[in-house]
Each structure stands twice: as C-alpha cells, then as structure tokens.
Image (tube, rainbow, N blue to C red):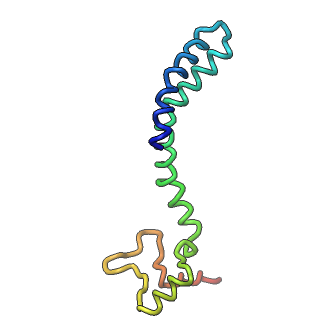
Amino acid sequence: MPTTLGLAEAAVPVIVEGAEALVKSLVADLQQYIIGSVIEAAAKPLFAKVEAALGRLLLVPATMRLLGNANWWAPAPLRRFYARYGIREDDGPGLEAGPGLEDATTPAPEPARP
C-alpha cells in the first residue's frame, strides 16, 4: 500500500483537471456523468458507514432470530475440547428470558386441544 500511495496521490491533480475540462465542455451528458461521479466518490465513505450500521443493527439480529439454535454451532474439534474439559454454554446467573422470548432449556408448552 505505501508504494502505490504516492502514485495515487500524484494522479489526483490529473484526474481533477480532466474532470474539470469535461464539466466545462458543452456536452451535457459528460457534465452529468462527471458531476455524478464526483458526488459518488465524495459520498462513498458515508454510505459505507450507513450500510455497515444497517447490517449490524437490522440484518444480523433478524438473521439470528430466523436461524434460532442453528446460530450456535461449534466445529467438531471445539465440541470435543468443550466435552473434554467440561466447558458448557449457559445463560449464566441473572439472565432471564425477556418478554416474548422462551427459555432455551425449557420446552414450549403444548397448545390446548379442544
């Protein structure tokens, strides 16, 4: 990366001059394309952060909810390690199922039948 950074920095004035020449041209399509490209390049870091936040806040929890217990798997070597040393996963003290969430160790009650 450090070896190509100087080349990228040296290319910036050339790209800016080229974009400026195209924007000053009389061809409206070129003007719109260049202006749109500049706006996209300027906004890309912001959009990347928004996309990452949406993924972390919405998509990951929704996927985990849909997959249920399939989320919590361990590869065979890790399961053997856990079994050998008596390591197990549990909720720990003080954690309770929230509203609408059933305890994973307690089976759901059977629905009443008429």
Q: Position of residue 15 (x, y in %)?
A: 55, 22
Q: Position of residue 104 (x, y in %)?
A: 48, 80
Q: Nearer the viewer, residue 72 or 44?
A: 44
Q: Is residue 105 above or below residue 1?
A: below
Q: Is residue 84 above or below residue 10?
A: below
Residue found 54% across the figure and 60% down from its top: 62
Q: Position of residue 16 (x, y in %)?
A: 52, 20
Q: How many numbered markers are drawn? A: 0
Q: Is residue 110 above or below residue 3?
A: below
User: Which residue of the protein is positioned furthest toward the front in this rendering?
Assistant: 3
Residue found 54% across the figure and 71% down from its top: 71
Q: Position of residue 37 (x, y in %)?
A: 58, 26
Q: Is residue 96 above or below residue 33?
A: below
Q: Nearer the viewer, residue 51 or 79?
A: 79
Q: Nearer the viewer, residue 23 or 65?
A: 23
Residue found 47% across the figure and 71% down from its top: 101
Q: Quadrant of the C terminus?
A: bottom right
Which image quarter: residue 30?
top right
User: Which residue of the protein is positioned furthest toward the top in this rendering?
Assistant: 26
Residue found 49% across the figure and 21% down from its top: 13
Q: Nearer the viewer, residue 22 or 31?
A: 22
